[in-house]
Amino acid sequence: MPFPVPDRVRDVRDAVHAFMTERVEPAEPALNAGDREELRRLQREAKDAGLWALGHPAELGGGGLPFLDYVYVNEVQGRSEWGQLALGTFTLQDSLMLHKYASPSWRERYLAPMVAGEVWPSFAMTEPDFAGSDPTRLQTKAVLDGDHWVISGRKWFTTGAADAAYTTVMCRTEPEGTAPHRSFSMIVVPTDTPGYRIVRETPVLGINGGHYEVAYDDVRVPAENLLGPRGHGFVIAQDRLGPGRIFHCMRWLGQAQRAFELMCARLGTRVAFGEPLGAKQLMQQHVFDSYTEIQASRLLTLQAAEQIDAGDQARIEIGAIKVVGARMLHNVVDRAIQVHGAMGLTDDTPLSRMYRHAREARLYDGPDEVHIQSTARRILHKMT
């Protein structure tokens, strides 16, 4: 499905595509079963091939691809949920956040090992008892006691907490009466700190994806663990989430493209009532709808990425693609399952697992309804 990939990035994109289809995708059954050695083998191969941590800044030990170039690469990396881990880019948002906002000691302690894949980060924002769509109601608190922060509360959907060296925790640090979006800060908490307690792993639609509920029982960390200024948690979160949503959407395109390829292959080889499925008009409708939705989502995502690259926050564009991209992924995978029939419901293809992850996309990093409302409001403000 051609579209204009800049010449400067085509070779590395093709190399990542080959690594994904020849190395990562065939290894998915073992990876899904929890084979850590298989993951380490893929990571070594990625490093040997010069494909490791391509989006990380060069000064941190990464590949140094500019943002927009990495966006193109991120699509083919997204063909598998394991692409980020195999290619060392799953830490990108955290490394950029620490590089920009952390104290020198924390940058020295975590950045290089994180980019090298030697330590893992995690991020804690959502809480079980309050709507994640309204983060100003978060209840986890941090109180400054001398030269230490004391954190108390509970978070969940902290991805990778069991393997992480630290968790960045969003918590209320400012007194009542402070403007809601100036009341929260982000604090780095090493996971071996007393009081940091993993409560349980939370499966998502039957998949143990490494999401954890974590209790903070009067966790005490040095004051220097604060990221950026006090009360700037939402500023840092937006700085983290804006480009991150671009990366999500490009990976969704990679997943959708893979599902589309599987669907088209099935339509060409499966015979029903004396002819290939692809000869049936209703099946051709699936092809048409999927093709147009993928292409439209890709162009919207690239437009948003170009504006981010130019220094614009692109909030309208990012809000739009978050909704459009998640819906597109769900629709394309759903059609691919329909074309595969009963086989599509089994683990004989990657579609069943892809479908469940596609449903997650309409919730994480903000539910569709919030993005629709905020984006429409911004459009109306500009138009009136």
Image (cartoon, rainbow, N blue to C red):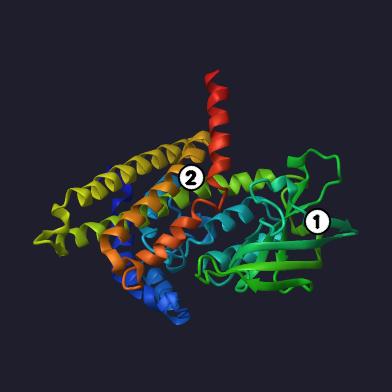
Label 1 amino acid? Lys
Q: Can you give x and y, in whole percent of width and height, for residue 112 in the image? A: 57, 65
Q: Nearer the viewer, residue 248 or 360?
A: 360
Which label belongs to residue 253? none
| Vertical order, 44 against 184 (above or below) | below
Q: Secondary structure at mark 2?
A: helix
Q: Residue furthest left?
A: 274
Q: Name which residue lies at 27% across and 63% down.
A: 340
What x and y, as percent, mark residue 199? 70, 73
Residue at 38% from the left image edge and 76% from the top image edge: 29
Q: Position of residue 97 (x, y in %)?
A: 61, 53
- Whether residue 319 sits left or right of residue 355 in the image: it is right
Q: Amino acid at mark 2?
A: Lys
The residue shown at (67%, 51%) is 131
Query: How busy is the neighbourhood of tag 1: few (under 14 within 10 Å), some, or many (20 plus)?
Result: many
Which dot marks residue 322?
2
192 horizontally vs 23: left or right: right
Q: Badge 1 is on which residue?
A: 141
**Number of numbered discs on residues:** 2
Q: CA distance from mark 2 to mark 1?
A: 30 Å
Q: Secondary structure at mark 1?
A: strand
